[in-house]
Image: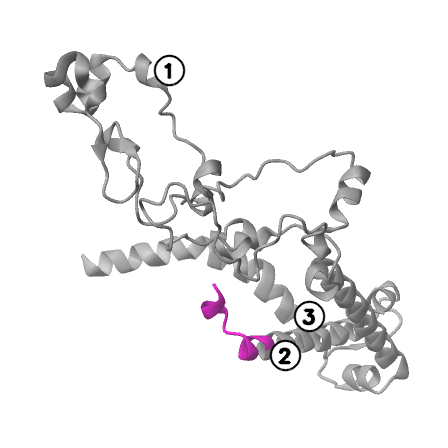
Amino acid sequence: MKRFSAWVTYLQVAPLTLVFLLFLVVPIATIVVVSFFDYTTTEIIPAFILQNYDELLFSETTWRTYLQTVEFAAITWVLTLSIGFHARLLRGVPCALAHHADGAVPDLHHSLLDLQRHPHDLVDPVPGPQRPCQHDADEPRPDRSAAGIPALFQFLRRPRLRASLHAVHGGADLQLDDAHRPQPARSGARRRRLGLADAGQCHPAAVQARHRHRLDLRRHHRHGRFRHRAHDERRPSAPRSA
Amino acid sequence: MMANAMSLLQYPAAAANAVVLLLVVLAIVAAMMRMVDIRKEL
């Protein structure tokens, strides 16, 4: 059985090996052999001479040609490098931030959790001290390197920024104070639309309370708001974004 | 240069040129492989 599987392996390798031999190894071997042949204006004479290499390596034309090739390669290399990595070489020229798109959110937005916020502190309007990386609201031009972007967008006939393809703002509400914090769908209208069946699925206690299931509000120990349904509860640990 | 030699039916000279260039390419690739570990980069 073991011998058989070895044969199968060789059979699997055989086609590519044959092609390789026929179209790569044999031609190259032929070229190497012919390079030692002698020749005249009319015929090629099988021989073993080093005159071809001698004439090639000690002629000025050869080295000028090789130097020219190296020159072209160097020019191409410089051009491709500067075009491909212009973000690194020429700072200030706008470019796609592909390496930021899939990266960690804190890298891009300097998001921070307001850990100092008191859970029962619902009226305190005083914001905490700003970190140096956070921009002030009245600063006219928050990011100097991005100042040219509107002109570029105008040039590209694209009037404004588009929404991000990635859900990078998944945990951004953790930064906002209560007045600006986006509310989950917990309005009166939505609560009225919640039938008994729905509530019964999510919250078994509501069925027993019958028509009073809306009063089944519980004080959650992490934040100072009321909770209606089990999944309205905010996860205490950090961003939801994947 | 090789095309020139071949158009003059100087195949051995062109072959010698080809062998030299092939050796140069192999030397460059060997040097790059020595500098960069491909398996690590993948």
Location of residue A188 in the rendering, given as x and y in whole percent from the top left corner: 36, 18
Residue A49, relative to residue A193: is it above or below?
A: below
Judge from the rendering whether residue A119 lies leftward or rightward of residue A108; answer left or right: left
Residue at the spot x=68%, y=70% of the render? A31
Please report, as a chain letter, where disc 3 is located. A
Quadrant of residue A225 within the rendered picture: top left
Q: Residues within 10 Å of mark 1 (few under 14, many from 20)?
A: few
Name the residue that disc number 1 marks.
A189
- Residue B36, numbered label: none
Judge from the rendering whether residue A5 lies leftward or rightward of residue A134; answer left or right: left
Name the residue that disc number 2 marks.
B27
Location of residue A209 in the rendering, given as x and y in whole percent from the top left corner: 13, 17
Q: The residue under label 2 is which amino acid type?
A: Ala
Asked if the residues shown at circle 3 and circle 2 are in contact, with their CB atoms under 8 angstroms apart, the answer is no
Residue at the spot x=39%, y=30% of the render? A184
**Residues drawn in magenta:** B32-42
Name the residue that disc number 3 marks.
A31
Residue B30, relative to residue A197: is it above or below?
A: below
Judge from the rendering whether residue A55 lies leftward or rightward of residue A207; answer left or right: right
Please report, as a chain letter, where disc 1 is located. A
